[in-house]
Image: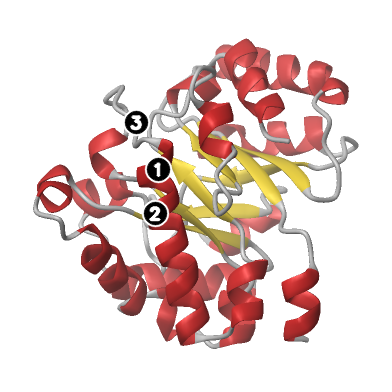
Amino acid sequence: MNVKQENMTRTKIIAGNWKMNTTSQEASALIQALAESHSGWGLHDHKKVVIAPPFLYIQEAAAAFSKLSHLFVAAQNCSQYENGAYTGEVSADMLASVGAEYVLIGHSERREYFGETADILLAKIRLALSKGLTPVFCCGEPLDIREQGQTFAFIREQLETCIFQLPENEISQLVIAYEPIWAIGTGKTASPEQAQDVHAMIRAELSAKYSSGTAQGMTLLYGGSVNAKNAADLFSCPDIDGGLVGGASLQADNFITIIKAMK
């Protein structure tokens, strides 16, 4: 099994996180623009695009993309609870029922603004997996940690206290997104060398904890002010398998340029 994983081609993914943006009309226009241009993106079994709109637009996007190959819809979050009296929450089961196939979990904004801990994130991941969703687990360091030279230790702790609690057959189903907090929405971007170093470290940690086959088979994304100008350089790094794109995913032309930058 591990030999097969080591020899496999890793899946490349370009994901667009719309965050709390777009009205219904704006979302519909963006969904339509993406659907209409889809055939020119060069997608295939090992190159996919995932769109994460606000909850309200997931069903519309899933319907528009349902007959388009290698184009999927993600939720930006899900509840750690399966169901019940949790006003305002959205469950993994609900997301799957309206066509979501991926879900972002552990984005730094969720950790910082909403106090999501490793235990909460782990509960979300387990529920997502149980409902057939693919979790995209986000990790990354703030600026002070980067400046102190503690990036690797910080991210290693994020991995160990959360997803490293999963068995190998479950963690292998995850996508991991490295997002340096100091580069999210700031216009600052980790250099290709900085990003590659962290991705290589994450893959080495996966290999040490589980196996080389699992580590080599998992998709690792970079997120942090990815744009049309820097995408190609970032995606050329050997351990970077795509990007989690924020603001640039709200502009169809820019996002399509980023998609095409992934070979």
Q: Which mark is residue 197?
A: 2
Tag 1–tag 2 contact (CB < 8 Å): yes
- Helix, strand or loop at label 3? It is loop
Residue on which disc 1 sits: 193
- Helix, strand or loop at label 1? It is helix
Residue on which disc 3 sits: 189
Q: Position of residue 79 (x, y in %)?
A: 43, 61
Q: Is residue 9 left or right of residue 197?
A: right
In the displayed structure, would residue 206 be above or below residue 12? below
- Amino acid at dot 3: Thr
Q: Which mark is residue 81?
A: none
Q: Residue at x 81, y 24 (%)?
A: 38
User: Which image quadrant is residue 73 in?
Assistant: top right
Q: Position of residue 37 (x, y in %)?
A: 80, 17
- Amino acid at dot 1: Glu
Label 2 environment density (alpha carbons within 10 Å; few <14, some 14–19, many ≥20):
some
Residue 83 visible in the current orientation? no
- Amino acid at dot 2: Asp
